[in-house]
Image (spheres, helix red, strand yellow):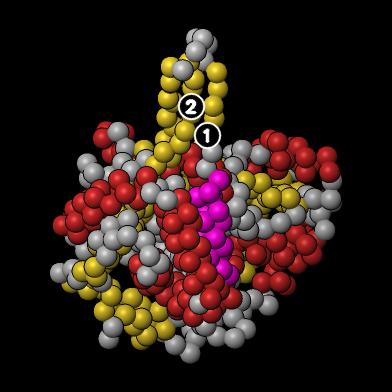
Amino acid sequence: MSEFNNLVNGEWLAGASYSPNLNPSNLADVIGQYTQGDASHVDAAVAAATAAFPAWSTGSVQARSDALDKIGTEILARKEELGALLAREEGKTRAEGIGEVTRAGQIFKFFAGECLRLSGETVPSVRPGIGVEITREPVGVVGLITPWNFPVAIPAWKIAPALAFGNCVVLKPADLVPGSSWALAEIIHRSGIPAGVFNLVMGRGSVIGNALVQHPGIHAISFTGSVGVGRGIALECVKSGKKVQLEMGGKNPQVVLDDANLDQAVELCVQSAFYSTGQRCTASSRLIVTEGIYPRFIEAMKARMAKINVGDALAQGTDIGPVSSQSQLEQDLSYVEIGKAEGATLAVGGERLSRGTEGFYMAPALFSESGKTMRINREEIFGPVASVIRVKDYDEALATANDTEFGLSAGIATTSLKYATHFKRHSQAGMVMVNLPTAGVDYHVPFGGRKGSSYGPREQGRYAQEFFTTVKTAYTLA
């Protein structure tokens, strides 16, 4: 059985123990044994990053660009192999895995260009004979803590801008799915980036994550994960003066109006709610449907969901793979029981499935006749469970969509320009989709939400510089 170690200061270092990386489609398939680091690995990684920072942050931007472009090129060249690895360890389908890897490669390519596009300002002073320059400089050593649901794309969209703008990095990937991040780290290691600029420390969040957040040598933390953990990280970062960026939960609404194209609305709802097994922070788990189209929508959803093939993530023809872990499956199934107990109607699905191999398979669940205050409509489930809320008209739909502590993504299905335009302006979400799934986003534009979903500057695209750089104002007497 292959063993995979941490990358610290350009060397592969073993921890005290190893943890198996299991395939959720087939629990008999062990992908590898991945080392479990501890606080000493974090200390060594931060020391290496600190030592590497002066040369990396002030060195050639062309060298940075070349390295990131090389990383992106190799990722894209190996997208089939890496996509299969991702599907094998996380449970999303091979096609989705390849798509995610492709996105990671494109992200590195994009930020290879951003290395050369970082700009500043020269402005006149209010005092004669003085010049003012406003520039952006790297923050320093950044800790990146990434989730299990996008094990290569989310590390990529944090690592690439961090490196592009001259920071040094310590990455802590999700303990559940270390394989994709390890493969990415191995590619970065061979890109020509100096030792210590990028470091990988695998292990438990309670150990490695806490050590990063509390380390005095870390200047910024970028975290994607649960609300509870994120809020705890924010408090710790404020105490020590660290810059912090959080992407957390969502309870994303998808509105369907009476005038919507029914087939289009059903397809985008199925894609938003159930693909990637519903394990996306942008997934729509609240389907808010006006009463005129409601009965036809429910029947059409049931018919469409009957065609969904749940199976092995690597198998040809699979639409939806397994849930990622036993604990996540238990949580999803518990919410099905909660929904039934609250009085919602389980229209279809919601049961555990048996397949040819032992895995965490579950039939996507759709509730009808659900109430706005039910727990299944208030709490993030993070699985293939969606509920339909009947509303009278657009005004009630908008109010219901905004009635949540979260504000990441929101969608509307309508043929009305009036309602689409109003929804885009008045939806309390960071990202709004019109006649599109809520879960599809581009890599070159800002990603992030409002309210309890996000905290701090946006991720991705040019807006990534807001977090990974700090502004300096310099005065010069002519």
**Callout 2, which amino acid?**
Glu
Amino acid type, residue under disc 1 in the picture: Gly
Q: Is residue 115 magenta?
A: yes
What range of the chain is rendered magenta? 99-117
Q: Earlier in the sequence, mark 2 or mark 1?
A: 1
Neighbourhood count class around disc 1 (C-alpha, 10 Å): few under 14, some 14–19, many 20 upward: few
Residue sticking out furthest to the front: 478
Q: Nearer the viewer, residue 380 or 163?
A: 163
**Which residue in the structure is indicated by mark 1?**
120
Q: Secondary structure at mark 2?
A: strand
264 falls in the magenta region = no
**Residue nearest the viewer, comparing 476 with 343:** 476
Q: Which residue is pictured at 54% across the width and 38% down the height?
A: 119
Q: Are marks 2 and 1 in contact (CB under 8 Å)?
A: yes
Say which residue label 2 marks.
133
Can you name the residue that lies furthest to the top here? 127
Relative placement, left or right, of 98 versus 30 is right
Where residue 245 sits in the image (x, y, percent)?
42, 43
Across and down, in percent, residue 325 comes to 39, 70
Q: Quadrant of residue 449?
A: top right
Badge 2 crowding class, 10 Å Cα cut-off, few under 14, some 14 to 19, many 20 or more, is some
